Amino acid sequence: MPNQIKPVAASSKGILYYQEKNSESFFGVKVTTNPNITRLIQGNPAHWPKAADLHTDKPKTLILADWTAEQWDESEIQHHKKLIAALMDKNFPIYLWQDGKLIALTKNTLNCLDDSEVRKKITPISSAELITQAKTEHGFEENQTFVLDDHWLKCLSQNDFALPWVMA
C-alpha cells in the first residue's frame, strides 16, 4: 500500500464525478456550435457558446461498502481513513453502509473505522441494490452516487482505475 495519498487521477473523472449542466450561458469569440442570434444581432463579438463551460464536474456521493473491512489490519485502517479524509477535502460526501443503513461520515466521525465492531457491520450488498436503496431512502441520484468496495478502494489507493477485478 502506498504511503502517500495521491490526488485523484484524471482517469477517475468519469467514475468519481458526474457532469452538471450549467444554468448560465458562457460565450466567446471562438467559433463553436450555433451562435446566439440575439447577441449576434446586438453586435456582440462574444456570441459563440463555450462548449467547455456548458458542464461542471461535481463529486459523486460515495458510499463506503467494503464488507472485507472487518479484516483490515491497523495500517490498512489508517491508510483508508487518510484516503477518505482526502476525498472529503475534495468535497466528496461520503456515507458508510452499516447494518442495512447509510450513515454520513465526516472528519469528526471517521475514527469510527478504528472500531472492529463498526467494520464488522459493513455487510455484503451489490452496488446496484445499494444505489437503489440510497435513491429510495435518501433521494440520491443513480448517476451521482458511487459505491466504494474493496476493488475501488484499491484503485484509489494505487491511483489506477484500470485494475482488474480480483475475487476475494
Image (tube, rainbow, N blue to C red):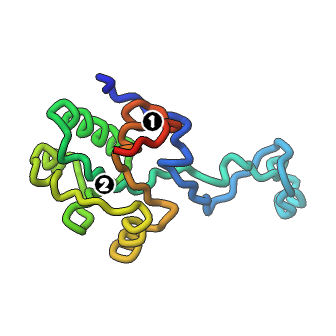
Residue 22: x %, y % from top left: 61, 58
Residue 65 found in image quarter: bottom left
Above or below for 164 versus 23: above
Query: Which residue is painted at 34% across and 72% down in the image?
Result: 138
Label at residue 96: none
**Tag 2: Cα neighbours inside 10 Å, few (<14), some, or many (≥20)?**
many
**Tag 1: Cα neighbours inside 10 Å, few (<14), some, or many (≥20)?**
some
Label at residue 65: 2
Mark 1 secondary-structure assignment = loop
Q: Is residue 12 left or right of residue 77?
A: right
Query: Which residue is painted at 37% across and 50% down in the image?
Result: 148
Residue 31: x %, y % from top left: 86, 45
153 or 51: nearer the viewer: 153
Which callout, 2 or 1, points at the residue further toward the start of the chain? Answer: 1
In the rendered view of the protein, which quadrant contains the N terminus?
A: top left
Extreme residue in the front direction: 167
Mark 2 secondary-structure assignment = loop
Q: Amino acid at mark 2?
A: Ala
Q: Which residue is mark 1?
A: 8
Query: Which residue is painted at 15% across and 54% down in the image?
Result: 120
Query: Which residue is painted at 51% across and 41% down in the image?
Result: 12
Q: Amino acid at mark 1?
A: Val
What's the distance in space between the residues labelled 2 and 1, CA to CA?
19 Å
Q: Is residue 15 left or right of residue 103?
A: right
Above or below for 105 versus 86: below
46 or 6: nearer the viewer: 6
